[in-house]
Image: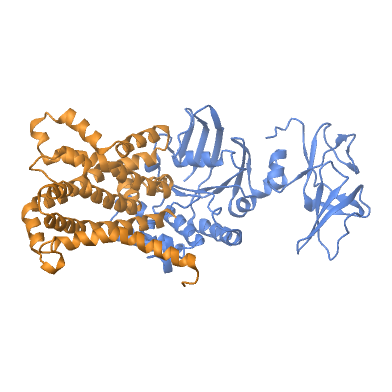
Amino acid sequence: MLKSPAKILQLAVTLIACAFLLVPTLQSVLAGVTVNYFQGVKSGLTLKWIWEVWDLYAASIFLSIWLAFCCLICTLIIGVPAAYGLARNPGRMSRVLEEFISLPLAIPGLALALALLQVYGSVQGFRAHWSFILVGHVLYTLPFMVRAVLSVMAAIDLKTLEEGAASLGAPAWRRFIDIAVPNALPGVLAGSLTVVTLSIGEFNLTWMLHTPFLKTLPVGLADSYASMRLEIASAYTLVFFIMIVPLLMAMQWASARAQRILK
Amino acid sequence: MTLKLTGVAKTFPGNIRALAPVDLDIKEGEIVSLLGPSGCGKTTLLRIIAGLETPDAGGVIRFGGDDVTALSVIQRKVGMVFQSYALFPNMSVRRNIGYGLKMQKLPKAEIDARVDEVIALCRLEPYADRPINALSGGQRQRVALARAFAPRPRILLLDEPLSALDAALRGQLRDELAVLLRSFGITAIFVTHDQTEAMAIADRVAVMSHGNIAQIGTPEALYRAPASPFVARFVGDAMPLAGRISGGALHLDGGALPLEGADGSTAYVRAEDVKLDDNGPLTGRIEAVTFLGTHYRIVLSGITPDPLALLHVGTSAPTVGETVRIGITPGAILTFSPETEDA
């Protein structure tokens, strides 16, 4: 296997690149369970910092999960019918609309947040409510849901399937429930996982919209880095990993499934 | 159920005339084929009958005594077999077939009984609980037919039902489809561009061209008495005998044939009516010889401006470059008066 110097060089570069990415990650994880980071691992391992994070930031964790869940519900309710509408009426207007929905991808989260603050910032009950952050998250994640569902719907020749169902006597709402949604399910799944992951990890927009009483996971992370012991911030990162990695893996799996349908 | 179309036309946006006003009468239980080249309006006509397209104002569609022109596809109760079959990949064979019955809100026991009946009729028992993706092309075609037929439609409509299959399978399934459709005893219309398919399955064939029905009749009638050069060419591949008709004879480059016909008429002949004949009135040169098992196909030059083909049954054939005498079966020449509208 390692016959030529070129191969050895390739392997070395790969390993160095991996180390470059992994070492800080592992060090951070280690710091989160070390008694005293400045003395190193010899000071002993502990779960104390993780419990401390839990005490300080449990509200952030629950808020993030709650926001991601609500964001998912909203993008499902808006995004799936929107993708269905776009798939059924392919035309110039649909393209324009699709681009319009995708605009939040191109606009920085900060700008989006500023715009929201300018328009709704003075609405008292709304500004300090978690639903204000939710609006930002929905705006930001909706294009991912629409695109994921639309690409699967475009690939399955939905128009003919619907004509088939209509010729069997199925009205529009039944065709949506019986034909469009089940056959676009891989797209819905891939879109859902993307939305949840993005919502949990979203920082730019949320940083602008949050209040001291409404901190999400990434905002809490920034806060802990700024104001807590390094061990607590590192333990926080560990908690974040534990939450986001299974989601990322599920997302990979779902998009692989969606890809298979598209073939 | 009878079907009666009166003045049914279709103009698409941009003033594109897909269908000229068409009249069509189909009897109870009759199987009619719409045959024509692509773009002749046959699929548009089928989709109008299904209710998937609306005809231009003035057109009337009647199923039996009912005027169904204003009814949408959902209410029209037709069975439709699509070119791509449009089977629902998220449902099993059984659920696909039962879907139309479920939409009629029938009790479950009744749906199950009817689905079993249709599955047996279409010999789909071994596949009943399989997903669609696990079926072959031929099996999918039968499921599509079973699904369209299960809700007892008033009329069965089939859009190129065999064209998604490979050539070897198509011939076999053509005969199978003909038998199944007869066993259903239902009025059926199917669209095809393949004359063999149309002739094998249909009681009557409507040959379409440029949005018009050029001729409708039994396969034999179309073949033996085509109404226009287009029909002659499309059904049975008639070849033009381009020459001058005068004084009771047809004068060709390779000789003259006795033929009664008005001056200025056009004449056509089919390859099976052209013969190698040592006493024949025409002279031609052999351009190509193809051995096809049951017969030879021989291409001749020098008789008409375009090459003329003949089918020769025998154990040997002349060689390329030979000059041969050619005859034509008496009475086999199709003549069309100059007034015959050609598409």
Q: Residue B36's spot in the image, x, y percent?
A: 62, 43
Instruction: Please tell me whether residue B341 is drawn above or below residue A70 in the rendered image.
Output: above
- Tell me what residue is drawn at x 53 percent, y 42 percent: B43
**Left or right: where B302 falls relative to B82:** right
| Quarter containing the C terminus of chain A | bottom left
Q: Is residue A216 above or below residue B147?
A: above
Q: Nearer the viewer, residue B342 or A256?
A: A256
Q: Horizontal and vertical percent for residue B4? A: 50, 38
**Quick check: A67 above or below A4?**
above
Which residue is at a point 48% across and 38% down the rendered structure image?
A: B48
Q: Whole-percent x and y of residue B61?
A: 47, 36
Looking at this view, is B2 or A196 the one in front?
A196
Q: Is residue A18 left or right of residue B154?
A: left
Colour applied to chain B = blue
Whether residue B202 is visible to the viewer of this picture, yes or no, is: yes
Q: Is A63 or A90 nearer to us in this picture?
A: A63
Is B59 left, or right, of A31 in this rendering?
right
Chain letter of the orange region = A
Point out the residue furthest to the left here. Answer: A55
Residue found at x 42% / y 33%: A92
Residue A188 lies, with reference to residue B226, above or below; the image says below
Asked if residue B90 can be seen in this view, the reply is no
